[in-house]
Image (cartoon, rainbow, N blue to C red):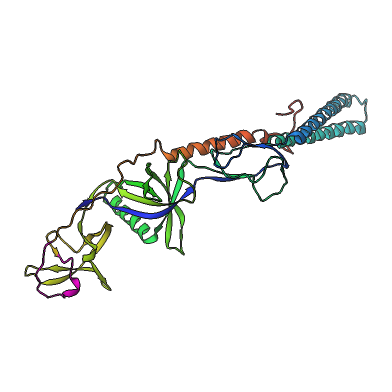
Amino acid sequence: MSFRPSFEVPAVVEAVETAQIFPLVASRILYQNIEPGKYFKQGEELVRLDPYPFETSVATAESAVAEAMSNYEDAKSNFNRARNLRPQGYISAKDFDTAKSTMLAAEAQLNKAQTTLHQARQDLSHTSIVAPFSGRVGHPNYAVGDFFILPNSVPITQLIKTDPVYVLAHIGQKAYNEFYSALDKLKQQGRALPNMELYIVLPGDTVYPYKGEFFSWDATAAATRGTVAARVLFHNPDGLLLPEENVTLHGKLLEEIQRIVIPQKAVSQDQQGHYVYLLDKDSKVKRANIEVGMRIGPNWAVREGLKVGDRVLVEGLQKVSPGDAVEVTPVKIEPSKDATPQNLRPPPHSLREQLRKEREAFQEYQRSTMEVRQRNQPGDVYTPYETGK
């Protein structure tokens, strides 16, 4: 028979990214946009903390920077005059050193004031808490008016990326090793790797309309379970697939193969392995050891041990022994039907590429928010008139 090898395993939906949303500063919650299940795009505001204490800190720090800048300019002018007068001997070495140390002290105070202003501005910016990536939020753990105290182990809410999602399935280590052994044989034969059609069935036998895209195997096996975890990406634009939801993952090769197929009830097993009873040309029973492959509905695909034209006993196996002469009634095995749903469609784009672009966008978002933070850190050389740069 010609058929498409397939498998089905239990699986669970898993979020690609999950973030616990914590404020970075302690303040009262002024307002929040959080509603359980609400969708937020990256950068949209989730919560606003009371900015007044931090605006005051910024104003105070700006005044301190202005005062420190004035002191530095005065000290620098005195030092420049002292440097010009020193060669003529109009001022003593002690006065010169005093002018220099005064200028350096004023510069240090300016750096300190600038650092304080920088921190105050950062704290003020942290009063607006935005979504680090696009996703849906959970239930808020605080209400408007609550004062968030640091440190705190309870987040304001949880943000979950819902599109795409992983479907996590645990594959037996034997099947995993056989899979890669088969791939290695195909490579040695110079044959192309077979394409696999992946889809899931939801509770209630509802077929999810989008096909999946294989993402990765786990880096380690689960020794206690004897499995290896595989992740498949699924397009989830409407958020139908929920994290922790139980589903069934189906896989089917796109190319058909041909195998001898016999009913499972015709196959017995003992210490030597799988075997069947055949009829020779004299209608006498004889044993034949076989190697079975995949299950196809109620049938076995046979890898080795049978050839086209062999007559296999299907029923009454308990009544016969090798060497018995029997009379038989022929039966016909109906070919198994391809049960792949007809309404499946591929995702509108590569989900792996989507993840790559979104992660690059998130990295760029992080760089933009860190841009000011990366300049004028304590210990950096400070140049006057670059306040705020």
In the picture as drawn, the residue positioned furthest to the front comes out as: 204
- Is residue 49 rendered to the left or right of residue 278? right
In magenta stretch: residue 322: yes
| Quadrant in the picture for residue 105 | top right
Residue at the (28%, 58%) spot, across then down: 294
| Position above or below: 31 against 288 | above
In this orientation, does residue 126 appear? no
Residue at the (41%, 38%) spot, across then down: 350
| Position above or below: 100 against 194 | above
Provide residue 106's location: percent of width, then percent of height: 84, 32
Provide residue 67's location: percent of width, then percent of height: 84, 28
In this orientation, does residue 204 appear? yes
Residue at the (79%, 33%) spot, across then down: 56
Q: Quadrant of the C terminus?
A: top right
Provide residue 96's location: percent of width, then percent of height: 89, 31
The residues colored magenta run 312-330
| Quadrant in the picture for residue 69 | top right
Provide residue 311's location: percent of width, then percent of height: 13, 64
| Position above or below: 113 against 250 | above
| Position above or below: 125 against 198 | above
In the picture as drawn, the residue positioned furthest to the left comes out as: 282
In magenta stretch: residue 218: no
